[in-house]
């Protein structure tokens, strides 16, 4: 029996990963049975760490991921993750890999999957609030599902917005425009993805047209929120995991303030991909609250590992 552990660096993951493969792996995993306790948080002086364990089929996996907002001033990613993939049959550590790129791709993938099931089929326009790492994969994934004619991007940081527009316009067929305000970015969008670390509502309810689908991606820890809670009075809410969503997802602050309760949640993304219908009328507003699931990570990590074995990528070491 092979005892070595495969070490996969970012460059190895980069050689394998794509948004199409990640969406396929994540969507298939959401339809399966898995065991996934809610992530646990550790607060440190400059940010936080999260441990995310899961068992899916023949794999057990854990991601150890940090969110350090000030890292951007040091030229480092704000999100850094390491993944350990174990064999469920023997517990042997099969691989240790960079999880940062996997986090970005699997987060984009779930935005694409949620949009596929929740947004109107005729959706043509996308508004991206935030122009960082997650916004890039949101755009890649959503443009695989919809033939987007117009994408608007807004970021507080003008340089980031410009760089995003320059880089990403090469990768989609529709027009990519820089918006001068969040209002301009979202008010004519069929689909909106919010990917900022905001701790106060920045997208106002009055700017959201009837029929819009929103992927609320940025809020993934207690106290974070991007949407005006008034939107929840008319929106159908889908969460990825109710325990995580109540603790740190987009609905955490509105629930804490008593504006909505858990009973206002219409379903989970797992129920949605298995056939639960959420949108009833064209004018319904839908909000997908993503906190990030370990099952997204293991589905993507397993796909990367299996392809790395076939391609002979990575470095094998004997850990014990
Ligand atoms: N749901 C998930 O699964 C998941 C996964 C990864 C990251 N996240 C969260 O998503 C958020 C973004 O992560 P990232 O990796 O893209 O970070 P990033 O630093 O690469 O990008 C965030 C961008 O938001 C911009 N921004 C900050 N405040 C803003 C505001 N008020 N208005 C407009 N733009 C603003 C910043 O200038 C930056 O460009 C973080 O909160 C992170 O914790 C969620």
Image (spheres, helix red, strand yellow):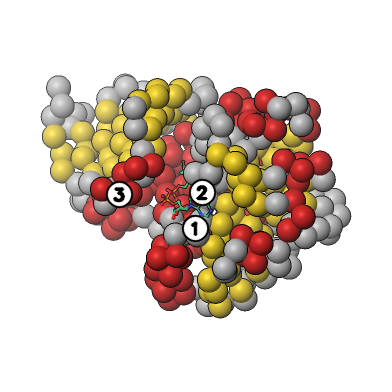
Q: Nearer the viewer, residue 75 or 34?
A: 75
Using the image as rendered, state which of residue 298 and residue 119 is in the foreground: 119
- Residue in view at x 35 percent, y 25 percent: 44
Say which of marks 2 and 3 sits in front. Answer: 3
For the residues labelled 2 and 3, the Cα–Cα distance comes to 16 Å
Q: Is residue 49 left or right of residue 106?
A: left
Q: Residue 12 location in percent, x, y?
A: 25, 52
Vertical placement of residue 196 versus 92, above or below: below
- Which residue is located at x 65 percent, y 67 percent? 184
Quarter of the image with the C terminus in it: top left
Q: What residue is rendered at 85% in x and 51% in y?
A: 280
Dot placed on the residue nearer the N-terminal end, 3 or 1 = 3
Q: Which residue is mark 3?
A: 73
Residue density around tag 2, few if under 14, some if 14–19, many if 20 or more, within 10 Å: many
Q: Name the residue tied to disc 2.
A: 196
Mark 1 vs 2: CB contact within 8 A? yes
* Above or below 153: residue 98: above
Q: What is the quadrant of residue 182 in the picture?
A: bottom right
Q: Nearer the viewer, residue 114 or 270?
A: 114
How far is mark 3 from mark 1, CA to CA?
15 Å
Q: Position of residue 9 (x, y in %)?
A: 23, 46
Q: Mark 2 or mark 3: name the one nearer the start of the chain.
A: 3
User: Does the beta carbon at disc 1 come under 8 Å from ligand 1?
Assistant: yes
Q: Does the numbered disc 2 mark a residue whose Cβ is under 8 Å from ligand 1?
A: yes
* CA gap, disc 1 and disc 2: 10 Å
Residue to which mark 1 is pinned: 156
Query: Secondary structure beneath disc 1?
Result: loop
Percent across and percent down for residue 35 are 52, 25
């Amino acid at each position: 029996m092979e005892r070595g552990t495969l070490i996969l660096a970012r460059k190895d993951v980069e050689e394998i990963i794509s948004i199409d493969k990640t969406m396929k792996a994540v969507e298939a995993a959401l339809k399966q049975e898995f065991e996934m306790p809610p992530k646990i948080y550790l607060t440190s002086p400059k940010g936080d760490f999260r441990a995310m364990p899961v068992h899916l089929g023949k794999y057990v996996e854990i991601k150890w991921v940090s969110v350090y907002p000030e890292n951007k001033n040091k030229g480092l990613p704000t999100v850094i993750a390491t993944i350990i993939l174990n064999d469920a049959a023997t517990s042997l550590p099969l691989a240790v890999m960079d999880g940062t790129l996997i986090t970005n791709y699997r987060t984009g993938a779930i935005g694409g999957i949620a949009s596929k099931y929740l947004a109107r089929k005729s959706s043509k326009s996308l508004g991206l609030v935030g122009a960082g790492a997650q916004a890039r994969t949101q755009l890649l994934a959503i443009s695989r599902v919809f033939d987007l004619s117009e994408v608007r991007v807004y970021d507080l940081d003008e340089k980031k917005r410009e760089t995003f527009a320059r880089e990403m316009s090469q990768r989609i067929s529709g027009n990519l425009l820089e918006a001068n305000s969040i209002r301009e970015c979202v008010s004519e969008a069929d689909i909106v993805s919010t990917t900022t670390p905001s701790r106060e509502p920045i997208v106002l309810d009055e700017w959201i047209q009837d029929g819009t689908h929103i992927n609320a991606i940025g809020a993934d820890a207690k106290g974070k929120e991007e949407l005006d809670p008034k939107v929840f009075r008319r929106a159908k809410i889908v969460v990825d995991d109710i325990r995580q969503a109540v603790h740190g997802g987009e609905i955490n602050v509105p629930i804490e303030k008593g504006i909505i309760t858990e009973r206002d949640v219409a379903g989970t993304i797992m129920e949605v991909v298995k056939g639960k219908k959420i949108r009833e009328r064209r004018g319904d507003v839908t909000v997908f609250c993503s906190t990030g699931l370990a099952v997204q990570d293991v589905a993507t990590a397993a796909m990367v590992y299996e392809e790395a074995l076939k391609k002979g990528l990575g470095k094998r070491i004997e850990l014990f």
